Image (tube, rainbow, N blue to C red):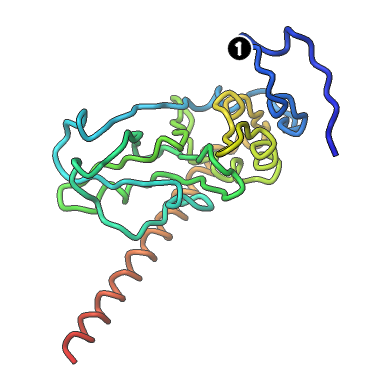
Amino acid sequence: MGIPVLRRVADLGDGLVLAPERFDPRRHVEVVARCCLSDLVDIVAENVSARSWKSPGAVLILDTTHAYEGFVVFRHDPVPPASMGSAKRRVQAGDVIISRLRPYLRQVALIDEALFRLRPGGNAVVASTEFFVLRGRTGFEAAGLVPFLLSQPVQAALAAGQEGGHHPRFCKELLQSLPVPDRVASHLHKTSQQVRRLAAVVRRSLFASRSLVARVEAEMGKG
C-alpha cells in the first residue's frame, strides 16, 4: 500500500527531483542528534584507472562482494595495476566503504591497515566505484561509524532511499544527511578502537585459515 506524501515545488531541490523514493518518510532516522554524518566524515571520490595509475607495485581490488558486516573479506591476491580494468576508487587505511547498491546486503567495511601489507614492500588498495568512501575529518575516525551504518534504523533509511529501476541505489546526499545520535558521536573514538581490534582479529583468522589450507595442499602433494 502506498504512502501519501505532500511536497511543495520548493521541496524538490535544485534538480526538481520527482522520484517518489526521494520523499519517502522512512528515509529519516528519528533520533536525538546535534550533528549528521557529513559533520564527522568526508565522502571522497579519488577515482583512478589503469591508465592514470602512477604507483609501482601490486594493487588489491575490492568489489562490493568483499565488504560484509563491517569487514573486508576476500579470497584473491593483489594484481598488477594494468589488470585494474574499469575506474576504481583509491582508498586509505582507516577509510570506511559502503555500497550504494542493494544496502540490504550490509556491504559496509573498514579498510584495515593489514590490507596494505599483502606483498613485500606493501601494496595499494582500490575499490569499486559502487562504494561511497568515508574518510574521517580531523579529530574523528570513520571506523567508529561502522556499527551505526549497520544499525537497523540506518539500514531501513538507506533501503527506503533507493532510487532507480534496474539497479536501485541510494544517493550521497541521503548518506551525508544521516543524523548521528549524540551518544554515538561522543563515543566515536572508543568505538573506532573496538572496530579496529575486531578487524585485526578477522584478518589474522582469515590469514591463518589460508595458511592451513596451503599446508594441507602441500601435504596432499607429497602423497
Q: Is 190 placed above or below 172 here?
A: below
Above or below for 192 versus 114? above
Q: Nearer the viewer, residue 108 or 4?
A: 4
Q: Residue at (68%, 24%) from the top-left corner?
A: 19
Type of amino acid under label 1: Gly
Q: Is residue 89 left or right of residue 77?
A: right
Q: Residue at x 61, y 27 (%)?
A: 174
Q: Label 1, on which residue?
A: 15
Image quadrant holding the N terminus, namely top right
| Image side of residue 214 versus residue 127, left or right | left
Name the element at disc 1. Answer: loop
Q: Quadrant of the C terminus?
A: bottom left
**Quarter of the image holding residue 175?**
top right
Q: Nearer the viewer, residue 48 or 177?
A: 48
Q: Give the x, y percent position of residue 70.
A: 51, 49
Please state which of residues 54 and 130 is positioned toward the viewer in this rendering: 130
- Residue 155, x across and y down, in percent: 65, 42
The image quarter in which residue 216 lies: bottom left
